[in-house]
Image (spheres, rainbow, N blue to C red):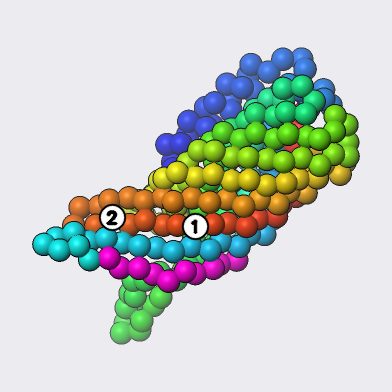
Amino acid sequence: MRRSLFVGSILGVMLITAGTARAFDERRSGFILGFGIGPSVTSFTQETRFSFFTTTIEKIPRESEFGLATSFKIGAGIGEQVMIYYVNNVSWFSVVDSTVRTTSNVAVINDVIIANSVGLVGISYYFEETVPSPYVMGVLGVSVWDAPFEDGSSALVGFGLGAGVGWEFKPHWSLEAMVNWGKPSDTLPFLGETEINAVSFVITIAGLAY
């Protein structure tokens, strides 16, 4: 995840540096840069397969967590109704650490912040060339399940996609609702393969510079 964020940042700097006079000219065509924030609900299951002499499957029942959703976009508008961009949709929430640590004979259970993201290539289609306008969105790419604030954590990576609708109610400002799905996994020596199946429902207020 950290490598993909670095690559995305480099691409963003390149796009900004290469911006033309059409950037931020109040038209959807040309360079775009956007950010959104709002509430989220993430529902997920976890399955771990241990393969030694026999295969053992450990499943954690489906859980749902409320949290914060963020969205980042950078790309270009093709005309006034179509936008293509790099996107990263993240749902942030906390889960109880399954590891119980003891301090001075007192059990301590830690909360862990999870960043569940779906992103890469996104596309939006606006039904109107002018504001206000409804629009639809789609995301195709990768999903990442990570605990970015935990030392030594290993991110799970897999296929991801998303879809949603939006309403640009005034220039540069929209209300968006999305569903993001991902199935990240990872295989660790002696620990087996862990697979997450996660669905996030998010509503964001999004600002888009164009």
Residue pointed to by mark 2: 193
Please tell me in which quadrant of the rendered image residue 81 appears. top right
Dominant secondary-structure state across the stretch colored magenta: strand
Does 59 appear in magenta?
A: yes
Query: Do the residues under discs 1 and 2 have CB atoms within 8 angstroms?
Result: no
Q: Nearer the viewer, residue 108 or 15?
A: 15
In magenta, the rendered stretch is 57-66
Residue at image location 35% in from the left, 62% down from the top: 47
Q: Nearer the viewer, residue 3 or 116?
A: 116
114 over 89 or under it: above or below:
below
Residue at image location 22% in from the left, 66% down from the top: 56
Please tell me in which quadrant of the rendered image residue 93 appears. bottom right
Mark 1 neighbour class, 10 Å CA radius: few under 14, some 14 to 19, many 20 or more: many
Which one is earlier in the sequence, the residue at label 1 or at label 2? 2
Q: Is residue 97 left or right of residue 76?
A: left
Q: Position of residue 194 (x, y in %)?
A: 33, 57
